[in-house]
Amino acid sequence: MLGKRCFSSVVPEQARVVVVGGGVIGNSVAYHLAKQGWSDVVLLERDKITSGTTWHAAGLVVSFGSTSGTSTDFRKYTKKLYSELEAETGQSTGFMPVGFIELATSKDRLEEYRRVADFNRLCGVEVHELGPSEVRDMFPLCRVDDVEAGFYVADDGRANPVDVTMALSKGARMRGAQIIEGVEVTGITKDRLGQVSGVTTKGGDAIKCEYVVNCAGMWARQFGELCGVNIPNQAAEHYYLITEAMSEVDPSWPVIEDPSNYTYIRPEGGGLMVGLFESQAAAWNVDKIPSDFSFGEIDPDWERMAPFVEAAMSRVPLSAEAGVKKFFCGPESFTPDLAPLIGEAPEVKNYFVAAGLNSIGILTGGGVGRCVANWIVNGKPDVDVTGINIDRMHKYQSNPLYRGHRVVESLGMVYNCHYPSYSMKTCRGAKKSAIYERLKAAGGYFRDVSGWECADWFAPPGVPAEQSELSWGRMNWFPYWEKEHRAARENVILMDMSFMSKFLVQGRDAGAYLNYLCTANVNAAVDMITYTQWLNDDGKLEGDVTVVKMSEEEFVVVVTDTMHRHAEAWLRRHIGDRFVTVADVTSSYAQLNIQGPRSRDLMQALTTADMSNEAFPFRTSREIDIGFARARCNRITYLGELGYELLLPAEQALHAFDFIVDEGKNFDLTLAGLKALASLRMEKGYRDYGHDMDNLDTILECGLGFTCDYEKPGGFKGKEAVLKQKAEKTLDRRLCQVLLKDPQPLMFHAEVVFRDGVAMGDVRAASYGHSLGGAVGLTMIEPGRPVTKKFLTSGTWEVSVAGKRYPCEVSLQPMLDSKNLKIKA
C-alpha cells in the first residue's frame, strides 16, 4: 500500500526548519520549502508517514464550494500540483479528474450554490449548472426526483491520499529535505527573546533550528501546549462506508456530493464509497489524543449513525441492496469556526502552524504547504490570511468543555446550508458585557461575536426576541433592523460595542513607538483620538485602529474583535528595546456608543462637560462625568453620524447605561444592534479590516491614504512603499462602494461585479442600505487598468446575485455624506 520507502534515520544536530508531522500537510510544507531552495529542512514523524489521519482520507480533490478566495486558490493549486507530481517525481498521486457534482435539493441550496458558482467562476473554476436529467446521465444510479440542479466541475475528482503524500515526500527529498520516521518531538526550545531555537525528541536527540512548523494534525493542540501555543482543534468521529462490488458502477463516474443527505458518494473498489458528515457528530478523546494511535480505527456507533447512513444511501437506492463491505470510523480534527489554523503563532516567534484542516487536508494540502513555505521564506504571507490566521483564536477555546461541544457543531456545519445570518449555537455565554442582562430584557437577540454575546437587533415590546427560520431573504427582524437604522440617521441610538478589543500602551517611548507603527500622527495633542492604519514594509495593511492619546506616556488602541490577538502580537513584536508596555484591557472597559443627529443634545443632558461643537469638536477625547461614572468620551463615529463613543470602567457600565436610558426617554432614544452597525457603516463606506480589507491590500488601494502623515518625525512603517505607489499616480485596483438600484435583492458577500459584461471583482462585505434604498457593499475593483471616477461612471455596471444580474452604481466616494458634514456638525 505504501510502496518502497527511502527515509533517513539519522537525526541531524541542526536544520533551518523542522517540520513536525508526516501527513499530507507536513510533507507539502517540506516539499514547498525545498522547492524554494531551502533544502536544510527536516521533517520528523513520530511513527510512519500518513499514519495519523491522512491514510484514511477520502481523497476528494474539489475546487467548487468556497466563497473564500484563499481557499479557492488553495484548491485550484492543489489540483494542478497533484496532476503534475508524477511527472516530476515518478510517484503517482492517483489523481483522477473524473468530475464533481454538487446537488442542490432545495430552493435555499440552489440559491447558495448559484452564489458560490458565481464566485468560483470569477476565480477561474469552470462551473456548469446541470438539470436533474443531466446529473442522472453522468451518474445513472443517482436518484434525482428532488434535485433542483447539479453544479458540475469537469476536472475535479479524486486522488489517493497515501500516494499524494508519498509523492510530496519524494519531491522534498529529491531537493535535499530529510524525512525521518519514528522520531517523536517532545519539546521546543527558545532563545532569550522568545524565538524558536530548536526541538527536543523522545530519543534524546536535539536539533537546533530557526523555525518549527507544527503539522501534527489532531495532535497539534497537544504539541502546541508544550511551549504555550494555543491551537484549539479537536478530533471527532468521521465515517464512511464502502459497498460490496456493484456491476452497475462505472469507476469513471464523477464524485457526487449531496449535503441535504449528509453525504458524498464516489466509485471505490468496484462498489461505492458513501461518506458522511452527520448533523449530530461525536467528539473523540477530548482529554488527550493517544500518542500511539497510528493507522487506527474507532469502533463505529451503528445506532447513532443508522439514520444518517440510511439517508445517505437513499441518494443511490441500489447501494442499500449491495451490502456493506466496510463501515469505517476514524478521527478527523475540526476548528471552532471551521476554518484552518495557519500561520505564525502569536505566542512564539518563528513557530508556524498548519493544522485544523476540517477534513479538507487533501484537497487544499498543496495550497496550504505552498502558503506556509512562502510565509517562512519571504517573512510574510502572499495570500489573504485574515480568515485563517492562527492568531484569531482565543485561549479559552482550547478548554476541554468548549472543544467537546463546539466540534459537534463544527462538523455538523460542513453540509449545512450556509445561511448568512447563522450564528454558532454551542459554547454560548462565555463572554458577556456588563449590560448584557439589560439588553436581553430590552428584547435583544444575541449572536456570537468572537465569543461575545452581542445584540444583533431588538424585538419590539411584547414580541419574542426569536429569529424566524433561516433564509436568504428578508427575515422577521428586517423591519426591527430598519427602525434602528433610521433612528441612528434621524434621531439618536445607544449601542453596546464592548466587544471591541482595547490595549493600553504606556511608557516613556509609547508616543514615538505608536507613531512609527501608525500611518497617522497619533502623538500630537493630548486628548485626541486618531483613526489610522498599520502597514507592513510593503505598504500593505496589518491593522485598522483608533488611538487615543490620554497623556504623553499613555495611549489606548482600539481594534475590531476579529483582530484582537493579531493586534496584540503586532504591538508586542515591534517594541524591541523601547521603554513601552502593552496591556490587554478589553475586559476592563465597556464601550457604549451614542450616535445620531441628536446625540449631542442627549450627551449634554447626561454630563456637566461642555459638549458644544466649539468646546468638544470632532476627534476630541476627554474624561467626563456620566452620573456617578467617569467615562473617556471620544467624539468619533463608525456609523456616519454625529456621535460619541464612551469607554467606561466595566464596574460602572451598568450604572451609566441605566443613567443614559433614563435620560434618553426624553429624546426617544433607541437601542440598536449590530445589524444596524453593519448597514450604517456600509452606507458610509467605512472599512473593516479582515472583512473588506486584507493583508494583500495597500492603504492607497483601500482609499485610506488620507491617514498617512508623510512629514511626521520618524516616518512610519511602510512609508517608502506607500510613497512609491503614490508616485505612480494611478491605481489599477480600488476599493469602491457598490449599490444595487433594485431595492429587492440582497447582497452578503462574494457577489460578482461586472462592467460591460466583464467581471471586475467581488463584493467583499455587504448589508442593506435602508437610507440609500438598496443593498450596499464594498468591492475591490480590479480591471487591469486605472480605476478612475470616469471609469466608474461610464459603462454598464451590474452585480450577479445568485446567477441573476442587477444594475448597480459604483463609487469611490461615500454615497452618504461624502463631505462629512454630518459627523462634524
Image: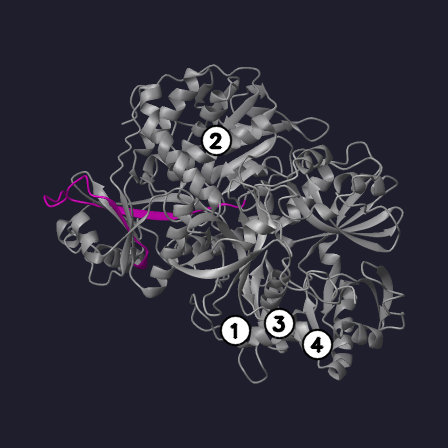
Q: Residues within 10 Å of mark 1 (few under 14, many from 20)?
A: few
- Residue at the location (58% across, 51% down)? 790
Residue extent of the magenta highlight = 232-260
Q: Which residue is mark 3?
A: 485
- Up/down of 201 relative to 793, above or below: above
For image coordinates 15% across by 50% down, the residue present is: 140
Measured as percent of width and height from the top left, residue 780 is found at 55, 48
Q: Is residue 505 left or right of residue 199?
A: right
The residue indicated by pointer 2 is 370
| Cα distance between the residues tagged 1 and 4 | 19 Å
CB of mark 1 within 8 Å of CB of mark 4?
no
Give the secondary structure at mark 2.
Answer: helix
Q: Earlier in the sequence, mark 2 or mark 4?
A: 2
Marker count (numbered): 4
Q: Identify residue for label 4.
A: 491
Expressed as whole percent of the image width and height from the top left, the position of residue 89 reads: 35, 20
Task: Say which label, 1 or 4, has the lower sequence index.
Answer: 1
